[in-house]
Image (cartoon, helix red, strand yellow):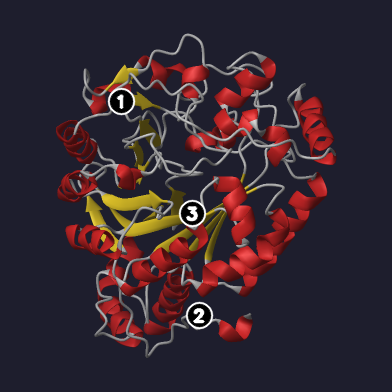
Amino acid sequence: MSEDMTLSTAQNKQENGTGAPMGMLAELTYRCPLQCPYCSNPLDINRADTELTTAEWQTVMRQAGECGVLQLHLSGGEPCVRPDLEEILQSAVEAGLYTNLITSGVTLTRERLEGLVKIGLDHVQLSIQDVDPNTAKLISNYKGGAEKKREVARWVKELGLPLTLNVVIHRHNIENTSEIIDYAVDIGAGRIELAHVQYYAWALKNRAALIPSREQFYQSVKVSNEAKERLKGILVFDVVAHDQYAIRPKACMGGWGRSLLTVSPSGKVMPCQECETIPGLEVDNVRDTPLEDIWFKGQAFQMFRGTSWMKEPCKSCDRREIDWGGCRCQALAVTGDAAATDPACHLSPYHDEFAATAEHEAAEEPPPFVYRRLG
Amino acid sequence: MDESISKKRTVVTQESRVAFPPHIKLHRDAVRQQWLILAPERVFHPDEISVAVLKQCDGTRTVAEIAEKLTHEYQATIDVIQPDILDMLQDLADKGLVDA
């Protein structure tokens, strides 16, 4: 039996051609009480872009169900700041989607969570910034988060929902990998995401403040691999590795336009959250075009779908349909060409410099964070 | 830390009565025309025999009873079919997809 990870490393089971999308990341809003310096939201959030209305999101959910989306990830920003989260969720449940709430938890009440469970919420992914409350506060620039998150985790379990713990890993918390795993078991999580920072958007701006050393990364992976074996049947692990210290790139988004789509707060439908940095990319909006048409025919989805856009060394590589050339946005950011090989790949001529820059930054004292703020 | 882990690994035996926990869904996908298992942030593609077994996993039948039933449908002997079913269900239990 094969497995699809629907958010981080998805693979769609399609023999040929384009299949239906497996997962949809619905960024309901960019608003968030936290200011984490690795936020994946765009740097230049345009406040003038109005968020989709309740009715518009409900249409998106119906269209998603009709075109074959299986898993819905309600995200943001912080999705709980939308007062109409319940109505949007209701439509998603009616559309037959498996619903996942990705939240920091800080604005939730038990009553609200109970209401969401009654509507049909399937799963909660709760983030923490660190097990050390002081570091957590430093990262999120938010007071009192640590206690609240533990409380939210308890509510999730009391209400009988499965729980994933998400922790973004960087130089300020990487030494706590073991304690973070213990915390996940302690709160009753069935799954943990240890997401070593991917350097896009705010994280790229804060790279020197975040990036750990190669040795720290290897040690953290060793700890998580050992724990994975020890906790078999208790905790499922999903580790997103560091591109800078990798040999091969990851199949970013499971391959461009193969499994996943993202809908931004203002209705832009994108193959990935960061893709608007790519010149020549035309992003369609669900306000104008049905989701299915955008998925199958939209220029943004076609641009790097499959392998025909590839250059060497990807073009003749026998891993081209395993990693799909890695990440287009990272290729652009590092090489200036979005169709180049992801520099995470050892075959990229930029790979050595890419890794050396990271190691150099990790060896220096971390600069202060540039906190994520809206526009 | 090990002592404080309250949750234990599920071990599937021929006496186990296997069932899906809440929020794990065996789902017939109309768009793809196939059976899928929907789990937190994961989708699994069970093969035909796995689907036949999983449809029987309602928490009342034992693995031995399910194996016995399937020997007729697949014209295979129980000593062939039962170890395969146990391996498959143990793998699913380790992934958190079934309880026993």
Total labels: the figure holds: 3
Left/right placement of residue A359 relative to residue B66 reads right
Chain bearing tag 3 is: A
Going by the numbered disc 2, the residue's amino acid type is Arg
Left/right placement of residue A170 relative to residue A157 reads right
User: N-terminal of the two: label 1 or label 3?
Assistant: 3
- For the residue pair A12 and A330, the one nearer the viewer reads as A330
Chain bearing tag 2 is: B
Q: Is residue A90 above or below residue B97?
A: above
Q: Is residue B79 above or below residue A211?
A: below
Foreground mark, 3 or 2, reads 3
Residue A25 in percent (x, y) is at 37, 39
Left/right placement of residue B30 relative to residue A323 reads left
- For the residue pair A305 and A46, the one nearer the viewer reads as A46
Chain bearing tag 1 is: A
Q: Is residue A26 above or below residue A352?
A: below
Q: Mark 2 near mark 1, Cβ–Cβ under 8 Å?
A: no
Going by the numbered disc 3, the residue's amino acid type is Ser
Q: Residue at x 63, y 22 (%)?
A: A331
Label 2 and label 1: CA atoms lie apart by 44 Å
Instruction: Let me know if residue A168 appears in the view.
Output: no
Name the secondary structure under disc 3: strand
Residue carrying label 2: B9
Instruction: Let me know if residue A374 appears in the view.
Output: yes
Going by the numbered disc 1, the residue's amino acid type is Ser
- For the residue pair A143 and B69, the one nearer the viewer reads as A143
Q: Please give the label number shown on residue A257.
A: none
Residue carrying label 3: A127
Residue A270 in percent (x, y) is at 39, 26
Residue A61 in percent (x, y) is at 21, 39
Please rate how many residues cluster around mark 3, counting C-alpha atoms within 10 Å: few if below 14, some from 14 to 19, many from 20: many
Residue carrying label 1: A266
